[in-house]
Amino acid sequence: MRKAKLSMSKKSVWLFLCLLLPFINSAQAIAVAVDDDDVVVKAMKDEMERSLTRLKLDGHAPPYFLSYDTSESDRVDMIASLGAMVTRNRNHWRSIDPTLRVGSYVFDNSKFIGDASNSWSQSTLPIDNNYEAMRRKLWLSTDTDYKKAVEVLEEKRAHLKRNNIDDKLDDFSKEEPEISLESRRRLKIDEQIWSERIKKLSSIFREYPAIQLSTANLKVNLCNRNFVSSEGTRIGEVTEDWVIVLAASTQSKDGERIKDIEVIAGHKESDLPSMESMEQKARLLADRLTTIQNAPVIEDYDGPVLFEGQAAAQFMEQVLCENLASQPESITAGYSQARTTSLAEKIGRKILPRALTVVDDPFARELDGQALFGCYTFDSQGVRSRRVILIAKGVLKSLCTDRTPTKYSQHSNGHSNGFSGSSSIVFIQSDSKKTDADLLERGKELALEAELPYFLIVKRMLDPNAKTMLVLPDATVSDLLSISESSINLAKPVCLVKHWVDTGKEEIVRSARFEPVNIRILKDIEMVGGDSKPSLMGRGADSYTHLICPSFLVKSMEVDKDNGQRDKVPILESPAISSTESKQ
């Protein structure tokens, strides 16, 4: 009887184990899925704890703040031209960006420019999950940063003893720690299918012999990020970006280089439009450049200018958004230098028409079913992003801030880009009821008042990311946005139209440039449209974001003929033209 019971007990145990086996396998699968992050995070946590307790030079303070920010990227990059693949790469790498501060939140080694300046020590980590190799890399990076931070802090302290600095602000704000863990993902892409699609898109430009250079470029990147800090923040998040850039360029007979790009982007493959839609964008780009190539040259002009669609967003990006970010008030050896934006001291004052409200929303992921680019959950300092009303009914209310206190803001609103505050997805919302027809009519009225036969409409401006694209061996690179403390050189208009007052006829012109403007140009906005539209544009190298903006009319701007250097046109015509002629 006891043997029977024992036998039944073994059977029960065996049955139990059989039932448990799928769950054991599932647990193992989960462990494998997060194993990569476990190794990376364990290495960061262990080296951070050791550095905070033992890293100290005699006579100097240990670090009071330390963070490690790691990114593991899996990227596919394809470039095709005229139906042929030019490059096709898939790269996998890890990077580490440590931040170390010595002193205290009130006074540390930041915001000082001297002989011993702070260095940016971002470097690569092993892509293999080797704990010891990662610890070694973290150890050396942290050691280098600590010694540099001590040196900078001592130089800063000595400088302040010799110089009287008024209104001294804290150097670093205290923020609530965040814990947010997202499951790790891997990039899924059918490279063969996309290779064929990119080649097909690039082949469309073969139909346009006037186009000298053209490419279709697919960039897909999946990034698994881990961020840990000595304050207790622990972030694990995943971002995925799909970007297609169609680029083309041509030349006019006088040698002016004319180029433009079309950017298509989404956070996942399903965000991208149909192949037919992308082919249409390629043809529109080629048609646009071919038309501009044969357009007459503009005469010098001073009068009303209407900015529509993409150009309206580009104008606001360059004039307004570039100045909506807070800047650290740094001390430079030899003199005190307060680096603030030209808008910072205008908080509480009207800077835009009353019809406009400006909101920065890093959480916005789509608008009317269209995916928006530039959103994020946590900024580069590990602070949760926030929706911020920057301008309300034309009055400046706030700026995009990081963890550097200023006299206008003591805390971060989650908009750090690693160096200062930075805007994300910006909505310029309009309360105006004015239509496109109203803007045209007011443009005509202003032109008549100025005794001009026409006024100008800007439909597109040169995207900053087009600067180094499609450059011939003897070509020059110029005509792009630059900003100084007193003036803004706007990117040159690509698609510029004369609208004749008497007939309403529109004529494309080329070879134009804007005279430098400053922030006060915003006060010259005469009328604002009521329909805000999303536009995708370049912001920094290989970076794009959406800005939602209405069309608007500027009362008066100077637009002159661009007399800059021209590039020599090719001696022979395009082979495509020769091939076409030989068949006829």
Image (spheres, rainbow, N blue to C red):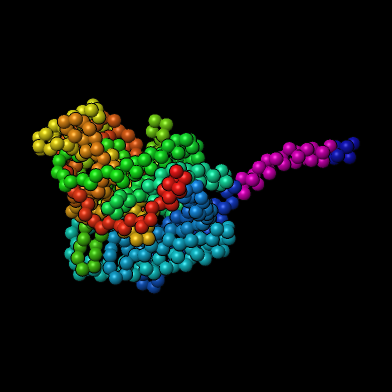
- In depth, the one of 397 and 430 nearer the eye is 430
* Magenta-drawn segment: 8-32
Image coordinates of residue 369 in percent, x first then y, are 42, 31
For the image, the number of numbered tags is 0
Give 570 or 168, whichever is nearer the viewer. 570
Name the residue: 31% across, 61% down.
Answer: 110
- Residue visible at 82% across and 41% down in the picture: 10
Left or right, residue 119 beside residue 357:
right
**Is residue 403 found inside the magenta-colored segment of the image?**
no
Tell which of 115 and 176 is nearer to you: 115
- Quadrant location of the C terminus? top left
Q: Provide residue 22's location: percent of width, then percent of height.
A: 70, 40
| In the displayed structure image, the side of residue 27 where residue 285 appears, left or right | left
**Can residue 281 be seen by looking at this rendering?**
yes
Q: Which of 255 and 150 lies nearest the eye of the viewer?
A: 255
Residue 375 x, y percent position in the rendering: 40, 42
Which residue corresponds to the image point at 41% horizontal and 44% vertical from the top-left?
A: 208
Q: If the image is split into quadrants, where does the N terminus sit?
A: top right
Position of 332 relative to 350 (above/below): below
Residue 198 placement (x, y as % from top left): 50, 45
Residue 237 shows up from this direction: no
Query: Residue drawn 56% across and 43% down?
Result: 193
Q: Quadrant of residue 320?
A: top left
Q: Is residue 20 magenta?
A: yes
Q: Is residue 542 left or right of residue 313?
A: right
User: Magenta part mainly helix, strand or loop?
Assistant: helix
Q: Is residue 372 left or right of residue 497?
A: right
